[in-house]
């Protein structure tokens, strides 16, 4: 048997805890009110185009992305705009959001809400890109990079491969897994659309070996199409990072500070491919996504199809309510996610999971001094020296942090995970990165 | 044997003399003529090297004064007027009298006023806490309580109080060097004029949220009701982003705004205890000012009407007038409640 592919440098293997892997996707009932943050994507925030008191339909544009890297935002329920004001986001800070009081679920007329799978692709390359932009599709892997920008290959570069990321390397999360198993047919159409939009021939779907049912099913479906190959991968975190995935699948290394297009690749998440299918074939904007609600003590861990803007509380209620000994509720995966400060915080386009941790597991170990064991250096998938970067960030030596490539950090948290001294290495680096980014920006001006 | 000793001594003496001669001429050749006043001025300075003057240490400050031959815009906050006068004597110039400043902590979100709602267990510095979370009370503007200001202080003038979780300024030690102001990631600490006999009145809140959420995070938050703005007879208080601010230059320390604040967000330092009389006076003043400002608004509205004759605009202004009066009357009701409410920090200041 041939050894499974994976990336070489660094990486860890945390316990998987894919508790909700066999739970089919359920549709969460429409919430009473939704808070839809305006800035849901990487890049510039969008401009609100609705007023207080206005009646909106599901799928109606409520905020328009005007900058190059920005995305449209659509109403996820129909009803009345209650207010356009700042609400607390997942980390407790205020962000501009549109609050809609839902009154039923009346969709815009031109949206196809039927279950029927539409396989025939009629749109041209430019039409596909325009549709993706119009419908506000962003990368659903978590980074929320606007998808239409990814499809516009910069001049002088050529895309060779389209890589579909079905790795889902974070422990606990199963939303992509369920999507692959349940919506394989639609997914393939989405991939075909991305392929056409990008103008590439070859497609690779990377899936970790702990999802054998997804690998089997998608291989079957992919055999009907040309040049789509499903590639099983060894289980290793953070294989879902695009640079790691390219390394694992093709052995190519993306140079420091560059995008994957530099080595002829464009990476998209399976969730994004599904959203592209809905946007182009069904004319449906990105108004819902699959979210994993899980946790060891949760009564009913599940995968839910949720409207954007739904409060986290609704999801937890659906999963059987908050257990008594809850210590933290984390938004996203356990490795990269952030603890929520309030259960009123809305689900956004980038939310892949909501994980409930019991008290014992949610507290940090006391921070001790660095013993120079080098475990973090071994674990870093980007080949950085996390202990050193953390020290530089602590001492606010931003220029030296930049020299040591702090901006290359993908914030996977592997260093933090391995540290025997319990040092919050990722926290330090996360504070350092925006400071260094600001410094570089100021210098540019 | 003797010869060797003599040779050694003579050659060493010769070498030494030659080196001395060379060094002497080099020193003459490359001598830097420095104004002796630089040393004198530096001597007069407190040698704290805190950077409070905006320059890199006391030597740089002395050099700048001697080089520019002026004291304009130069002030050593640590030495104060005394030192500046001494320097003026050395330089033969006249020193400007600077009002002494003091650091003021504009947050009263203690553990009782703003109870903990979430847990932050990251690195224990304010800078990191600010970057990674909104703070344990949920207030996005309030004190994080990790003590970056205490660490930044070279003069032992600011300390974290473990009971309240807030920093407290030791007035006698504070030199207004600005270090804590820069250390605070949330701009909570402000340098304010020390005031006559250390008396000063300020809004002890920097929360820019609207009334509801602000009050939810903290009992003593400024809710932006605007009562103090109306009440101030000297127009010293301005309202921006749901947050009132008292301009220390305009404030006449009349205390009339203090008792009418519905959340006790206005604090006063070094005043005698609030008497019934002042409270009564403040209430009456609020009534008077409300009526006065209402009339003024009416007059401007009428003027506008005469000027533009735009019907829509007039209705708008009269509507806001109605609102003002409603605010005024509801304010008086809540006054009686606030009078009895104990205010720990205020009484503490009185003792000191």
Image (tube, coloured by chain):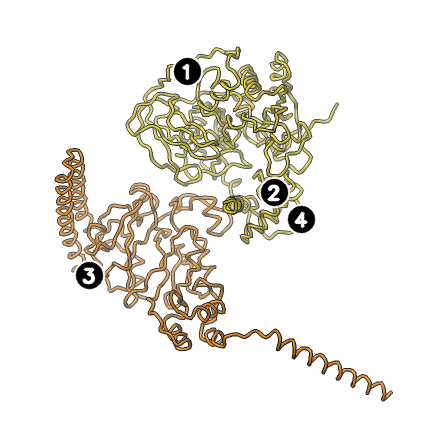
Question: Which tint is chain A?
Answer: yellow
Residue at screen point 30% across, 54% down: B203
Sequence-first disc among 1 and 4: 1
Instruction: Say which residue label 2 marks.
Output: A415
Tag 2 near tag 3, CB within 8 Å: no
Residue at screen point 31% across, 58% down: B345
Q: For the residues tagged 3 and 1, is the chain the same?
A: no
Instruction: Say which residue label 3 marks.
Output: B275
Residue at screen point 24% across, 45% down: B225
Mark 4 surroundings: few (<14), some (14-19) or many (≥20) residues within 10 A: few
Instruction: Say which residue label 1 marks.
Output: A111
Tag 3 near tag 1, CB within 8 Å: no
User: Image check: A243 left or right of B145?
Assistant: right
Q: Nearer the viewer, mark 3 or mark 1?
A: 1
Instruction: Say which residue label 4 marks.
Output: A373
Q: Chain of mark 4?
A: A
Task: Give the percent coordinates (x, y) of residue B71.
Answer: 39, 69
Q: Chain of mark 3?
A: B
- Which quarter of the figure is the C terminus of chain B placed in? bottom left
Rendered view: B57 above or below A66: below
Q: For the residues tagged 2 and 3, is the chain the same?
A: no
According to the colouring, which chain is orange? Answer: B
Task: Give the percent coordinates (x, y) of residue A383.
Answer: 65, 41
């Amino acid at each position: 048997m041939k050894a499974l592919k994976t990336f070489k440098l660094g990486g860890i293997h945390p316990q998987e805890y894919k508790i909700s892997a066999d739970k089919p996707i359920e549709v969460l009932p429409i919430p009473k009110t939704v808070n839809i943050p305006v800035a849901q994507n990487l890049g510039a925030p969008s401009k609100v185009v609705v007023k207080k008191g206005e009646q909106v339909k599901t799928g109606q544009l409520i905020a328009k992305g005007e900058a190059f890297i920005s995305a449209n935002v659509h109403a996820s329920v129909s009803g009345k705009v209650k207010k356009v004001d700042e609400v607390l986001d997942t980390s407790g800070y205020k962000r501009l959001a549109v609050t809609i009081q839902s009154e039923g679920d009346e969709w815009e007329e031109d949206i196809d809400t039927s279950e029927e799978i539409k396989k025939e692709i009629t749109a041209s390359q430019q039409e596909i890109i325009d549709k993706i932009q119009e419908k506000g599709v962003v990368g659903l892997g978590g980074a929320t990079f606007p998808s239409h920008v990814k499809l516009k290959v910069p001049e002088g570069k050529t895309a060779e491969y389209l890589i579909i990321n079905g790795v889902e390397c974070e422990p606990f999360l199963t939303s992509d897994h369920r999507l692959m198993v349940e919506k394989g047919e639609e997914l393939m159409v989405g991939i075909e659309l991305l392929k056409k939009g990008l103008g590439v021939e070859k497609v690779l779907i990377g899936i970790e070996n702990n999802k054998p049912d997804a690998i089997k099913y998608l291989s079957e479906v992919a055999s009907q199409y040309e040049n789509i190959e499903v590639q099983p991968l060894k289980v290793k975190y953070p294989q879902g990072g695009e640079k790691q995935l390219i390394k694992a699948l093709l052995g190519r290394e993306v140079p420091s500070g560059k995008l994957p297009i530099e080595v002829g690749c464009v990476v998209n998440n399976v969730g994004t491919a599904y959203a592209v299918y809905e946007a182009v074939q069904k004319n449906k904007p990105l108004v819902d996504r699959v979210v994993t609600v899980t946790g060891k003590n949760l009564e009913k861990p599940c995968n839910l199809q949720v409207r954007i803007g739904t409060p986290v509380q609704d999801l937890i209620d659906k999963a059987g309510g908050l257990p008594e000994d809850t210590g933290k509720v984390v938004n996203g995966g356990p490795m990269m996610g952030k603890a929520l400060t309030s259960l009123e915080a809305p689900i956004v386009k980038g939310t892949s999971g909501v994980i409930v941790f019991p008290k014992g597991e949610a507290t940090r170990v006391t921070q001790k001094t660095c013993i120079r064991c080098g475990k973090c250096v071994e674990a870093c998938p980007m080949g950085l020296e996390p202990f050193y970067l953390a020290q530089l960030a602590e001492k606010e030596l931003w220029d030296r942090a930049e020299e040591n490539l702090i901006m290359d950090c993908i914030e996977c948290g592997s260093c933090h995970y391995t540290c025997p001294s319990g040092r919050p290495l990722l926290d330090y680096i996360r504070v350092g990165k925006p400071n260094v980014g600001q410094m570089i920006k100021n210098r540019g001006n | 044997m003797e010869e060797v000793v003599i040779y050694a001594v003579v050659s060493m003496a010769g070498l030494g003399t030659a080196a001395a001669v060379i060094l002497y001429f080099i020193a003459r050749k490359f001598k830097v003529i420095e104004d002796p006043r630089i040393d004198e001025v530096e001597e007069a300075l407190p040698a704290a090297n805190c950077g409070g003057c905006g320059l890199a240490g006391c030597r740089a400050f002395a050099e700048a004064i001697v080089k520019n031959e002026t004291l304009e815009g130069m002030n050593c906050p640590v030495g104060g007027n005394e030192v500046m006068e001494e320097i003026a004597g050395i330089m033969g110039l006249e020193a400007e009298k600077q009002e002494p400043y003091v650091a003021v902590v504009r947050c009263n979100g203690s553990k009782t006023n703003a109870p903990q709602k979430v847990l932050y267990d990251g690195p224990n510095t304010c800078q990191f806490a600010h970057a990674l979370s909104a703070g344990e009370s949920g207030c996005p503007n309030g004190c994080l309580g990790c003590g970056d200001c205490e660490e930044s202080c070279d003069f032992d003038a600011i300390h974290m109080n473990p009971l309240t979780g807030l920093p407290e300024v030791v007035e006698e030690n504070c030199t207004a060097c600005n270090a804590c102001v820069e250390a605070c990631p949330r701009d909570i600490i402000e340098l304010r004029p020390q005031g006559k006999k250390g008396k000063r009145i300020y809004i002890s809140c920097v929360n820019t949220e609207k009334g509801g959420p602000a009050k939810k995070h903290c009992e003593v938050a400024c809710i932006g009701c605007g009562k103090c703005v109306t009440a101030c007879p000297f127009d010293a208080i301005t309202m921006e982003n749901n947050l009132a601010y008292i301009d220390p230059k305009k404030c006449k320390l009349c205390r009339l705004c203090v008792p009418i604040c519905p959340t006790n967000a206005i604090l006063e330092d070094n005043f005698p205890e609030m008497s019934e009389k002042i409270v009564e006076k403040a209430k009456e003043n609020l009534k008077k000012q409300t009526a006065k400002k209402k009339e003024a608004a009416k007059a401007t509205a009428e003027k506008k009407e005469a000027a533009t004759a735009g019907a829509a605009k007039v209705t708008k202004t009269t509507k806001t007038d109605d609102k003002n009066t409603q605010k005024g009357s509801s304010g008086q009701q809540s006054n009686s409640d606030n009078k009895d409410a104990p205010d720990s920090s205020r009484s503490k200041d009185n003792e000191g």
